[in-house]
Amino acid sequence: MERAGYNVITTGDLNEAVRLFEESAVDAVVLGDSISAEHREHLGQIFKRLKPLVPVVMLCKMSDSRMLRQLADEQVEAHEGPQFLLDALARVLKGNRVP
């Protein structure tokens, strides 16, 4: 994503993710599939509660629940590759979300 020109903030710690989200001016959030489904769901709920206008793009696995997927403004299947993620990110930043 940095190669595509985006500024990226990353962390592997859930509490730090929430802190960074609260303290930073972010245009969008990407929740990767390296985070467990339970933690992606929890973070998605927190992010939507704190800043409901910030879109969430979620990398999903085939086994992810419908409820988890509904938290995202855009979903990208993890196997689809980086261009699909960049396309989804561009859509949410332009406000053209796919239902």
Image: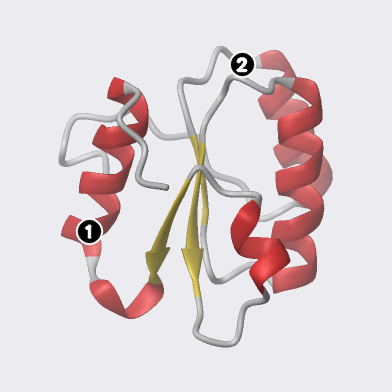
Q: Residue furthest bottom?
A: 63
85 relative to 7, above or below = below
Residue name at image x 16 percent, y 38 percent: 4
Question: Residue 32: image x %, image y %?
Answer: 51, 61
25 relative to 19, above or below = above
Q: What's under tag 1, amino acid-wise?
A: Phe
* Residue 24, numbered label: 2
Question: Residue 88: image x %, image y %?
Answer: 30, 46
Classify mark 1: helix, strand or loop.
helix
Quadrant in the picture for the N terminus? top left
Residue name at image x 56 percent, y 71 percent: 34
- Local packing at callout 2 (Cα closer than 10 Å; few below 14, some 14-19, many 20+) is few
Give whichever of 85, 8 is nearer the camera.
Answer: 85
Total numbered circles? 2
Residue name at image x 25 percent, y 39 percent: 2
Q: Residue furthest front?
A: 99
Name the residue tied to disc 1: 84
Question: Residue 52: image x %, image y %?
Answer: 68, 23
Measured in 3D between alpha carbons, the distance from the residue under mark 2 to the one under mark 1, in whole angstroms, is 25 Å
Q: Nearer the viewer, mark 2 or mark 1?
A: 1
Q: What's under tag 2, amino acid-wise?
A: Ser
Quarter residue 17 falls in: top right
Question: Residue 82: image x %, image y %?
Answer: 23, 61
Tell which circle, 2 or 1, labels the residue nearer the N-terminal end.
Answer: 2
Asked which colour scheme the image uses, the reply is secondary structure
Quarter residue 46 falls in: top right
* Residue 6, numbered label: none
Q: Is residue 24 left or right of residue 29?
A: right
Residue name at image x 16 percent, y 41 percent: 3
- Local packing at callout 1 (Cα closer than 10 Å; few below 14, some 14-19, many 20+) is some
77 relative to 84, above or below = below
Q: Is residue 32 left or right of residue 83?
A: right
